[in-house]
Amino acid sequence: MKEQYQKMYQERLTTPELAIKEIEPGDAMFLGGVAAEPPTILNALREYDGLKDNRMYRTLSTSPGFDLPANVLKQYTFFMSGFDRAERKKNPGIIDVIPNHLSDIGRIMQNREKEPIFMATVSPMDEDGNFSLGTTVNGSAEVLEVAKKIILEVNPNMPRTFGYENKIHISEVTALIESNAKIPELPVIEPNEKDLAIGKTIADMVQDGDTIQLGIGSMPSAVGKFLADKKDLSFHSEMMIDTFVDLYEQGVITNKNKKLNPGHSVANFAAGSRHLYDFMDNNEEIHMLRTDETNDPHIVGQLENFISINAAVEVDLYGQVSSEMIRGTYYSSTGGQAEFARGAHRAKNGKSVICLYSTAKDDQFSKIVPTFVPGTIVTTSKNDVDMIVTEYGKAVLKNRSLQERAEALIAIAHPNFREQLWEDAVTMKIIPAGFKNPYMTETVEELA
């Protein structure tokens, strides 16, 4: 049987230039997200003159878009990266954003495209003829169910990972190429003083035996630096980051108390250093699962003592969270933040934590605002957020009234903006006129 799989492998092995000729006019292409994008295939596609009325779907792209008109190649993203933002700045219409919760990507693709072409970087074939999806399962499993063609870039640098639907058999593959390209890495950013203050506040809420979810960014990562004294934590997240490896190697994460997937850390994509990818390689204690299995609020809600930790751009005095726009400009996407917040809200003893700096632009702007700029997208509902954390402390919103929420949020705003925020809250009739302002004399700890 092994010889048969090797024969099938050789029959499908080709060059990038020939592999992309499998793409016909009118075809839709779905690319493995983030570190699973196939760079060699994409480079060949940039030189290909056979595109017409094609569509391409990407998630957190790790290379620039295509400078092509929409009638040749219409480009979509489910989550914008720095490359997408740069392209949209030059040409606002060149990359279109599809609103989504991360767990919806597969379903959205099945509804939009009946027979897409799947393209991704995968790990080398094993003795059973299977390729691992490696760092990214996000949306891929659902697309593979309906894909009319599968084109793979086989790369020994892609970690071999495990999971229930985390593989493609050689018999399903249309064409494959071999590559030794470096897997894109996300630089590890050392936390600054604000990050550490936020991280410590959040870490103090984590109890032994809790299950944690960490989002993208330096603030959630800083939480890990203060968890070294915790015991038997579990990991259930959409994204696997370097902080997870640190906690695992310190013996903090054991996954022994999880109701779902006991003994396993679960995620649906990974982005980090080579150290992270090496740690994931052939590690059977890590399961890379479909996004609707990691992010679905109904599933997350079954995890007791679950803490969701994610970053935001702005929070208004009602507790609404905006995480995908910066001063009226679309910046990223929803990701899984809202899903994990809702899941934590359902979970027994769950907590949904949103963190952000109190200010931006060298303290010129408060990130706790009375109301959002008109047109700003609300990422997470005020009803799904339990707690907001800045470098000045925490504001508990769960079970609190609008007035109580505003008071708590003003208490963790930058001191330069608290007085104006109070006046704004009075103008908005959240706080009664003439109501005594206690925030100028009491400590943040007493007010939070």
Image (tube, helix red, strand yellow):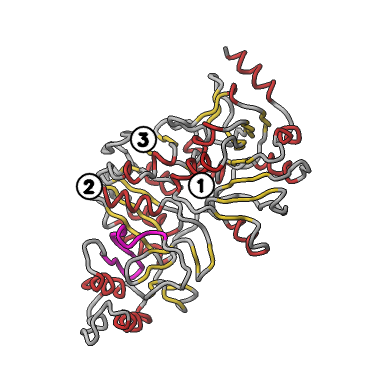
Q: Amino acid at mark 2?
A: Lys
Left or right of 332? Residue 231 is: left
Of circles 2 and 1, which is in front? 2
Q: Amino acid at mark 3?
A: His
What range is drawn magenta here?
379-396
In space, the residues marked 1 and 3 are separated at their CA atoms by 19 Å
Instruction: Write down the residue under mark 2.
Output: 348
Q: Quadrant of the C terminus?
A: bottom left
Badge 2 local density, few (<14 within 10 Å), some, or many (20+)?
some
Badge 1 local density, few (<14 within 10 Å), some, or many (20+)?
many
- Which numbered disc flags the more N-terminal residue, 1 or 3? 3
- Residue 376 horizontal/vertical position (percent): 46, 67
Could you say whether the residue bearing mark 1 is in a helix, strand or loop?
loop
Which numbered tag is attached to residue 271? Answer: 1
Instruction: Write down the residue under mark 3.
Output: 264
Q: Is residue 268 magenta?
A: no
Task: Please name whichever residue, 163 or 446, is drawn nearer the observer in this view of the structure.
Answer: 163
Left or right of 50? Residue 123 is: left
Compared to residue 15, the image places residue 300 above or below, namely below
Could you say whether the residue bearing mark 2 is in a helix, strand or loop?
loop
Task: Please name whichever residue, 370 or 413, is drawn nearer the observer in this view of the structure.
Answer: 370
- Which numbered disc flags the more N-terminal residue, 2 or 1? 1
Task: Please name whichever residue, 205 or 251, is drawn nearer the observer in this view of the structure.
Answer: 205
Left or right of 446? Residue 213 is: right
